[in-house]
Image: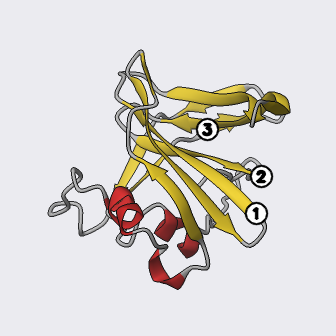
């Protein structure tokens, strides 16, 4: 789910109606079949990139919001079945549902290794139980004791009280 980004320039006095498209395959891989709510943050800048406003999390709820069980882990449920949902051509090679990291109310609670043809991907599930939004960076990656990426690889913003994914593709 990384990589969803909107950058829209709106001139003074005008309006814009940008569209964010969410890929259904990526939603299925996250265990999302039903959209209950969507949380968005907006950072608004002027033409010189000075921040004019930060909205913080804005939540848009669908008609499923009143009856949804947020404790149900639909992501782990499909991983435990050992096959990708919706007939996606992705093979689950390994899944570990154990706490790999826990510090300052940030937890890496599972890791899944996928393959799709010659491409492999590691998906880490991150839970932010703290009272602040975080930015998690992944740096200095080694495979079989060989460093394949020094420095920063990827980063993901995760709101307080939310879960998110860090995807590493090799």
Query: Of marks 2 and 3, which one's residue comes earlier in the chain?
Result: 3
Q: In which quarter of the image is residue 151?
A: top right
> Label 2 belongs to which residue?
170
Residue 161 on image: x %, y %: 34, 34
- Above or below — where is 83 with respect to 9? below
Determine the CA span between mark 1 and mark 2.
6 Å
The image's mark for residue 156 is 3
Determine the CA span between mark 3 and mark 1.
21 Å
- Above or below — where is 127 with respect to 117? above
Side (left or right) of 59 relative to 149: left
Determine the CA span between mark 2 and mark 3.
18 Å
Q: In which quarter of the image is residue 49?
A: top right
Query: Of marks 3 and 1, which one's residue comes earlier in the chain?
Result: 1
Q: Answer whether labels 3 and 1 touch (C-beta < 8 Å).
A: no
Crowding at mark 2 (Cα within 10 Å: few <14, some 14-19, many 20+): few
Crowding at mark 3 (Cα within 10 Å: few <14, some 14-19, many 20+): some
> Label 1 belongs to which residue?
119
At horizontal 45% and vertical 76% (from top left) the residue drawn is: 85
The image's mark for residue 42 is none
């Amino acid at each position: 789910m990384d990589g969803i980004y909107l950058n829209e320039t709106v001139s003074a006095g005008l309006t814009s109606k940008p569209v964010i498209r969410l890929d259904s395959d990526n939603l299925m891989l996250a265990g999302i079949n039903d959209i209950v709510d969507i949380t968005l943050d907006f950072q608004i800048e002027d033409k010189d990139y000075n921040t004019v406003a930060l909205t913080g999390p804005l939540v848009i709820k669908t008609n499923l919001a009143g009856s949804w069980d947020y404790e149900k882990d639909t992501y782990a449920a499909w991983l435990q079945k050992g096959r990708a949902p919706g007939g996606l051509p992705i093979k689950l090679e390994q899944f570990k549902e154990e706490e790999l990291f826990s510090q300052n109310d940030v937890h890496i609670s599972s890791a899944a290794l996928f393959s799709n043809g010659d491409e492999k991907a590691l998906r880490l599930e991150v839970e932010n139980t703290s009272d602040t939004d975080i930015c998690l960076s992944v740096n200095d990656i080694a495979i079989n004791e060989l460093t394949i990426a020094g420095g920063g690889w990827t980063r993901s913003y995760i709101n307080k009280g939310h879960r998110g994914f860090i995807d590493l593709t090799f």
